[in-house]
Image (cartoon, helix red, strand yellow):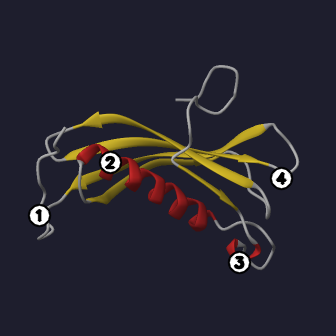
Amino acid sequence: MTSDDGNPPAGDPAIRVVAMPADTNVYGDIFGGWLVSVMDNAAGLIASRHGKGRAVTVAMDKMLFHAPVSVGDEVSVYGQITRVGRSSMTINIEAWRRHRFEEHAVKVTEADFTFVAIDDKGRPRPIQG
């Protein structure tokens, strides 16, 4: 999904958020779990929109951390559907950070999230679309 020149993917991010002091550990570093949560939220938005209904996370693969996130950094999360099955889909997610007073963005992590579309009773359903 990343462009060859190291810039974030084209288009709007699924989510954009600022890392806050409450998102840190005792050393002042942003928790990796906070970043995973933001990425899962972005992937869920994409999955629900594509599947035209409720979808749940069933797996996360290939999580790689490339760079840290600091308090005050703007985190933009981009996603692209890479596979669609009968009731499941895989979404590649990239998180990019931009220091508050800079224009340059850096990819901080990426992962593949697998979602399953479910009905009102929590059972898998075919993806409509």
Q: Quadrant of residue 96?
A: top right
> Which disc is residue 123 wearing?
1
Mark sitting earlier along the chain (3/4): 3
**Residue hosting label 3:** 22
Kind of residue indicated by mark 2: Arg
Q: Position of residue 4 (x, y in %)?
A: 64, 19
Q: Nearer the viewer, mark 4 or mark 1?
A: 4
Q: Position of residue 59 (x, y in %)?
A: 34, 55
Q: CA distance from mark 4 to mark 1?
A: 43 Å
Kind of residue indicated by mark 4: Arg
Q: CA distance from mark 3 to mark 2?
A: 30 Å
Q: CA distance from mark 3 to mark 4?
A: 17 Å
Q: Position of residue 8 (x, y in %)?
A: 64, 33
Kind of residue indicated by mark 3: Ala
In this view of the protein, which residue sits in the foreground, 78 or 61? Answer: 78
Mark sitting earlier along the chain (4/1): 4
Q: CA distance from mark 2 to mark 1?
A: 18 Å
On the rendered structure, is 79 left or right of 95? left
Mark sitting earlier along the chain (1/3): 3
The crowd level at tag 2 (other Cα within 10 Å; few <14, some 14-19, many 20+) is few
Q: Residue at x 39, y 42 (%)?
A: 91
> Which disc is residue 49 wearing?
2
